[in-house]
Image (cartoon, rainbow, N blue to C red):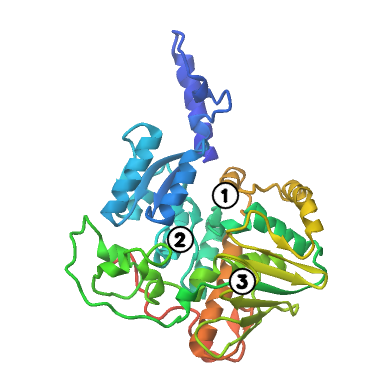
Amino acid sequence: MHQRSFTRRNMLKASAAAVAAPMFVPAAALGKDGAVAPSERIVMGAIGTGGRGKFDMQWLLQSPQVQLVAICDVQQVNRDNARQLVDKTHGNGDCAVFTDMRELLGRQDIDAVLIATGDRWHGPASIAAMEAGKDVYCEKPSTMSIAEGQAVVKVAEKTGRVYQTGTQRVSDFRFVFATELAKRGLLGKLHTVRAHLWPAVKDVTYNEILPAEPLPGREVIDWGQWIGQSPDRPYNSAYHRGGYACGAWGRFWDFGTGVAGWLAHTGLQCQFAVGRELSSPVHYANPGNKSGDGMVCTFDHDVKMVLQFEGGWRGTCGVRFEGTDGWVSIADDYTRPDVSDNAMLRRMQPILDDYKQQTGRSLSHMQDFLDCVKSRRQPIANANVMHRTMTTNHVVNLCLHLGRDLRWDPTAEQFIDDAEANAQRARDEMRNPWSR
């Protein structure tokens, strides 16, 4: 982005020198009065524009630092809605529309991409985007397996691209405050963290193959591209209708990530609170059923992460951190955390101010990404953080699927004395998503 920006500025200077007559230039074009000059904006494309993708696009379109110029989606209804949203916001008809993301990624003017497809495309799309020289903001859950996470990290390191996974709560001021209470020792010695699970993912092995329905035209939905790297399945509209977060597909193992799909919303906050965002628990105790409720994952310093459907918070995406001197809990429905001692709340603003000063990070997750695109520093939920926390989630899936305890070595990234579990660090049936 910066290299092209400097080139643009040089071109503008050369053009200005060649023009003898005075020319009026709007203040906004020069970046005055708080506006961001076009040459300094981050040019972005969006891949996957339904559901969460639309929400993310609306945020980006409100940012004066971003120029969203292209969208890609395999479903016509999503493409049409996204194009209208972009063109209406920009007041023109310039938004480019694609069905194949490779065409969008081939545009040299695009600095970064939003990836908000279904789970099965998150890894392959992120890898393709970084290899094409684009920075990436990818929605959660960002990988389908441990091996896929390793591949994303490898490409991020090789290309030097900025990568942020969309675990937005790790930047939300309410969750940040709760996490800082734990990290700063204000709860005493931390011994237990609790993460919310959604009951819709009780059975991680659910994988019904739905009967075939008449396949719509490719312009309506490109079914082969929709399936991506997942096993071939006959078209059925129930797969891509709503009903599970961003689509009904999420409850099918072929297309979703089981418990990992929901634990991506809560587990990462717990790992930050215990200082293990670049590691994973070392022991996973199977709860004796497929639900995962009450499952205990133990880190190398004996802090336990308990996965549960309810208790300890109100509403969804809740976490609770417990220490020897107190506790804190927070969920999406809260305006501020619940604490064991209300005196802690008087420290909220000073702690948040100190956090921002010490880290230099925004309390907006997407803004942290944009800041890092410009500065080239690592975002808070970078590729390594994504992979290590998603590894935790994938190991939880395997623990439930195999029906027994598992021991994990975070350094070697393998299960201890368990060939069967090690063989499942990658999915067996994943296919080349580009061969459709």
Residue 259 or 9: which is nearer the viewer?
A: 259
Q: Which residue is mark 3?
A: 195
Q: Amino acid at mark 3?
A: Ala
Q: Which residue is mark 2?
A: 127
Residue 241 or 42: which is nearer the viewer?
A: 241
First of labels 3, 2 by sequence position: 2
Distance (Cα) linking label 1 and label 3: 25 Å
* Residue 384: percent from left, percent from top: 60, 64
In the rendered image, the quadrant that contains the C terminus is bottom left
Distance (Cα) linking label 3 and label 2: 29 Å
Q: Is residue 110 above or below residue 424?
A: above
Q: Amino acid at mark 1?
A: Phe
| Front: mark 3 or 2 | 3
* Residue 68: percent from left, percent from top: 42, 41
Residue 309 or 110: which is nearer the viewer?
A: 309
| Front: mark 1 or 2 | 1
Element type at mark 3: strand
Q: Is residue 136 above or below residue 15?
A: below
* Residue 394: percent from left, percent from top: 53, 76
First of labels 1, 3 by sequence position: 3
| Front: mark 1 or 3 | 3
Labels 1 and 2 touching (C-beta < 8 A): no
Q: Is residue 276 in view?
A: no
- Give the residue drawn at x 31%, y 55%: 100
Residue 369: mark in rendering = 1
Disc count in the image? 3
